[in-house]
């Protein structure tokens, strides 16, 4: 069930059908009047969950625990459809609450605002002994692996609802329904979230198709860091919707040092495919079981397919970039200058060589440029070595302005592989120099189409 959390008594109008319940955070109200609460319970178009959270569990109730117990008893007499009680309350109080109020479905909760606990089984046993509607474990995810571990715990214990807090747990707010959460939480657009990482219900519905998610939904996603500006979740989920595929695409923050743990949990979670962005395109290679010949030459992967216990990799960056450029001019025989020598640059360089271009690799660290140039049969130099006769200039680095703008050749076709902002400082400078430009979104759409074909096409039959 999807609940929206409210910290006021104003009943929202036109709730999306996906919203199945309303949590009223009584501890966040300026004052609590039982008559007003009774009226609220009778008014909403959805079942209400009452919550009176104490400070140690992330709430703002100011009284003593004895005072809170007494007030909760009065609230329980209102027979709300749902009630959230912390699992660390007095056992006798919890037993009496569940026994004496059979019309109320209880959520017994545990919160950890610092970390994801290691003793999930112990917490679950402590909560489940009261046979609640669900055992809610809300914990701060300090890594994507933390969040995946929580979701896997839900898959193994179907009365658990895992609520992952924080930026690195945000994606799990979408995946909760796929894993088997009995309850999820969202916030209304424009309202303050009641917990870190809550997603707007409109995004859950419009982007992620929350209502149609189920345990058979295939999981795809993006890994890397940073990922905030990537539109991949909008594009790929739109494609899945258009193709009527029961699949979901989410974005996950993954750093190089956590790759081993992440891959382990990704396999356990039965993730089907991944897009890979900086800084992982080269570092992911030791975890890939099979790659095609061109990608092996490139030495960088931007797409993974998980199938029958093995991981397959390919690279759609090069074709995506060159296809975008060749809508403006043929690259055969042209002098292409690449700024940067990372994973994306490798893919573009090898594709440019296949298409007959002359290639120059420029990088802040000259040795990196020379290594890639040697592999692809190109020339190398520093960022100050832009030739005036360059036909095509491509910024493959995350630097918004990697070179002196006055050195951008005025007759060159210029591309920046960055997607957002659409008109980067590098492209703005190029336009002011009179250059024609190719926007990063053109490359993105091409390489994303290649990823879709890799995940869903003949290769995956």
Image (cartoon, rainbow, N blue to C red):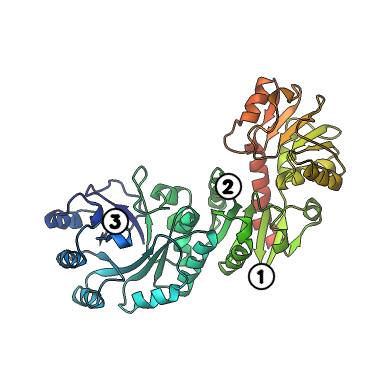
> Which secondary structure, mark 1?
loop
Instruction: Please count the marks in the image.
Output: 3
* 123 or 301, nearer to the observer: 123
The 10 Å Cα crowd at callout 3, few under 14, some 14 to 19, many 20 or more, is: many
Question: What's the distance in space between the residues labelled 1 and 2, CA to CA?
Answer: 28 Å
Could one spot residue 351 in this view of the protein?
Answer: no
Q: Position of residue 134 (x, y in %)?
A: 35, 70
User: Disc 1, disc 3: CB below 8 Å?
Assistant: no
Q: Quadrant of the N terminus?
A: bottom left
User: Disc 1, disc 2: CB below 8 Å?
Assistant: no
User: Disc 2, disc 3: CB below 8 Å?
Assistant: no
> Which secondary structure, mark 3?
strand
Q: Which residue is mark 3?
A: 22
Q: Is residue 236 left or right of residue 196?
A: right
Return the residue found at the far left: 35
Of marks 2 and 3, which one's residue comes earlier in the chain?
3
């Amino acid at each position: 069930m999807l609940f929206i959390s409210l910290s006021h008594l104003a009943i929202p109008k036109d709730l999306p059908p996906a919203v199945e319940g309303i949590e009223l955070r009584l501890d966040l109200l300026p004052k609590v009047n039982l008559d007003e609460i009774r009226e609220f319970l009778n008014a909403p178009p959805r079942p209400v969950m009452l919550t009176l959270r104490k400070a140690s569990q992330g709430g703002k109730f100011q009284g003593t625990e004895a005072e809170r117990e007494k007030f909760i008893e009065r609230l329980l007499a209102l027979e709300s459809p749902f009630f959230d009680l912390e699992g660390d309350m007095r056992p006798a109080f919890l037993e009496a609450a569940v026994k004496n109020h059979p019309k109320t479905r209880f959520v017994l909760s545990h919160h950890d605002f610092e970390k994801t606990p290691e003793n999930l089984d112990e917490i679950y046993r402590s909560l489940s002994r009261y046979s609640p509607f669900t055992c809610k474990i809300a914990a701060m995810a300090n890594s994507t692996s933390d969040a995946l571990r929580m979701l896997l715990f839900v898959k193994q214990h179907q009365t658990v609802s895992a609520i992952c807090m924080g930026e690195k747990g945000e994606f799990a707010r979408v995946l909760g329904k796929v894993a088997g959460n009995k309850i999820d939480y969202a916030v209304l657009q424009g309202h303050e979230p009641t917990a870190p990482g809550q997603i707007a219900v409109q995004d859950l519905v419009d982007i992620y198709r929350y209502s149609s998610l189920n345990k058979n939904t295939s999981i795809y996603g993006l890994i890397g860091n940073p990922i905030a500006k990537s539109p991949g979740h909008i594009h790929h989920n739109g494609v899945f919707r258009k193709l009527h595929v029961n699949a979901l695409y989410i974005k996950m923050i993954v750093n190089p040092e956590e790759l081993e743990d992440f891959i382990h949990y990704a396999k356990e979670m039965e993730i089907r495919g991944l897009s890979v962005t900086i800084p992982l395109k080269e570092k992911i290679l030791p975890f890939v079981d099979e790659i095609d010949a061109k990608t092996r030459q490139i030495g960088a992967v931007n797409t993974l397919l998980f199938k029958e216990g093995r991981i397959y990799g390919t690279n759609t960056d090069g074709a995506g970039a060159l296809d975008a450029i060749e809508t403006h001019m043929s690259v055969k025989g042209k002098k292409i200058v690449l700024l940067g020598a990372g994973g994306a640059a490798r893919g573009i360089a090898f594709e440019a060589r296949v298409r007959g271009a002359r290639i120059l690799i420029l990088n802040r660290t000259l040795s990196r440029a020379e290594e890639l140039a040697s592999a692809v049969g190109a020339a190398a130099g520093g960022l100050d070595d832009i030739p005036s006769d360059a036909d095509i200039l491509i910024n493959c680095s995350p630097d918004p302005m990697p070179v002196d703008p006055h050195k951008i050749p005025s007759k060159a076709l210029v591309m920046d592989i960055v997607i957002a902002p659409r008109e980067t400082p590098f492209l703005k400078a190029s336009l002011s120099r009179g250059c024609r430009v190719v926007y990063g979104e053109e490359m993105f759409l091409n390489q994303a189409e290649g990823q879709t074909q890799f995940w869903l096409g003949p290769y995956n039959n």
